[in-house]
Amino acid sequence: MSSELVVLGVSHNTAPVALREKIALTERRAEWLLQDLVAGDEFSEAVAISTCNRTEIYFVTSDPVRAEAELLGRLARDAEIRPTELASVVYSPRNCDAARQLYRVAAGLDSMIVGEAEVQGQVKRAYELALRAGTTGPMTNRLFGAALQAGKRTRSETGIARERVSVSTVAVDLARAVVGDLASRSVVIIGAGETAELTAQALADQGVRTVFVANRHADRARSLAERFGGEVGSLESLPTRLQDADIVVSSTSSPHPIVGAAELEVVMRARGGRPLVLIDIAVPRDIEHACGEIEGVSVYDMDDLQAVVARNLQVREAERAKAEAVVEEEIQRFARWLAQLDVMPTITSLREHGAEIVDQVLAENAGRWESASPRDLARIEAVARAVMQRLLHEPTIRLKESGHGRQQVLRELFGLGDQPAPLEAPGGDASDNVRPLKRRA
């Protein structure tokens, strides 16, 4: 019985976050689950991807219906929910449709933010975890290697990931547009929440090392400062720090402004005309609107940042069709390989059958060539095997073209017996003569 590739999963497209949280897998839980699955009879290979937006199990099985039911029950039981609740939100495409799902995930086409870069690393780490757990095999090895390659192609050949679409990275881009290279700039971060952390990371990626963190929560601020090579100070010392800063990023939860226009005018007089960029990522705003009217001061708030994000998302959406085309091209390569994998046992049987006939005919006629030299005998054998190879060449090509459709007819015509189990995955790409599978409607 031949094996099939299946994915069973839920994502932000099918399930609310409350349910996704219940079935999410830590690395340890994922490793246990995968090893448990392949230890049984239904699963021969398995890889699990689990992020905040999705949990997907890719597996190889000879009985997809039983394997899906077993895995669905296992996930529901571990999440302490009813299987029917999970069954209503899962998807389970097979073979090339399962591969298409992974390719689109790796390319960022199935993400909440199209083209996101983080997902490719998540797919790679999931595959590496399965490798360490010993739960991969010929099909999943080929699948994940090809999917990661498809993800790289979409990002290098299209603009799907070119424009920034997070508030933190857009904020840093705006700052760089005003003050130029950021590596030597002094930055003050007001606040120490998640947004401040993401912005600090984006600044660090641009080479920023001088960071001053002002926050009411000293422990959180200290941790952030240590991570990015900065100092921690109180909000009372902020005016002094602003005199030396080039960029200020503020993202507190204060109900009142942190930086007022009157105080900032005093600071700007002490700066001697040096420009200052203020990026306000807080709602309500941390920086008074009037600060933007002070000479030398550039203020960007959430409305400005979101407008840039929206424009960049439009650019990414415009590139989606190109990225989808790259994915489909890669899927056709996988389809050809999968088709060849399916017919390889029959092709092998056919060629073994031909070789046996040659051996039999040579053995039957061995006594008729007493006067032939060893060189003559070698030539006779070479000619016999060449005739066999040429005779079987066309049936082999036709079988690759038709995939599974002509296997049984050919086996009956040549008396090859029952269909054997599939072979291990062949090396290299499948023949280009194999007809691609069509996308499921």
Image (cartoon, rainbow, N blue to C red):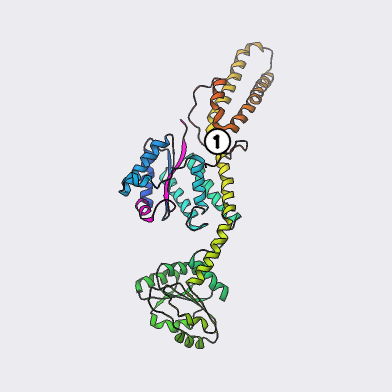
Q: Nearer the viewer, residue 309 or 334?
A: 309
Give me the residue at 50% from left, 68% from top.
Answer: 306
Give me the residue at 48% from left, 87% from top.
Answer: 265
Is the residue marked by circle 1 packed among few (<14), some (14-19), or many (20+) residues within 10 Å?
A: many
Q: In the figure, is residue 110 to the left or right of 394?
A: left
Q: Is residue 185 visible?
A: yes
Q: Nearer the viewer, residue 384 or 148?
A: 148
**Residue 431 figure quarter:** top right
Q: Is residue 233 magenta?
A: no
Task: Give, as a single range, the part of the protein colored magenta.
Answer: 1-23
Q: Nearer the viewer, residue 308 or 62?
A: 308
Q: In the figure, is residue 30 to the left or right of 266?
A: left
Residue occupied by mark 1: 339
- Compared to residue 358, the image places residue 116 above or below, namely below
- Compared to residue 409, the image places residue 425 above or below, namely below
Residue 386 position within the rendered picture, expressed as x and y whole percent measured from the top left = 66, 24
Q: Amino acid at mark 1?
A: Ala
Q: Is residue 20 magenta?
A: yes
Q: Nearer the viewer, residue 31 or 25?
A: 25
- Compared to residue 370, the image places residue 299 above or below, namely below
Count the labels in the image. Answer: 1
**Residue 387 figure quarter:** top right
Q: Is residue 207 visible?
A: no
Residue 179 position within the rendered picture, expressed as x and y whole percent measured from the top left = 56, 76
Badge 1 marks a residue whose secondary structure is: helix
Residue 294 position within the rendered picture, expressed as x and y whole percent measured from the top left = 52, 84
The outermost residue toward the left is 80
Q: Quadrant of the N terminus?
A: top left
Residue 389 position within the rendered picture, expressed as x and y whole percent measured from the top left = 64, 25
Give me the residue at 41% from left, 70% from top.
Answer: 224
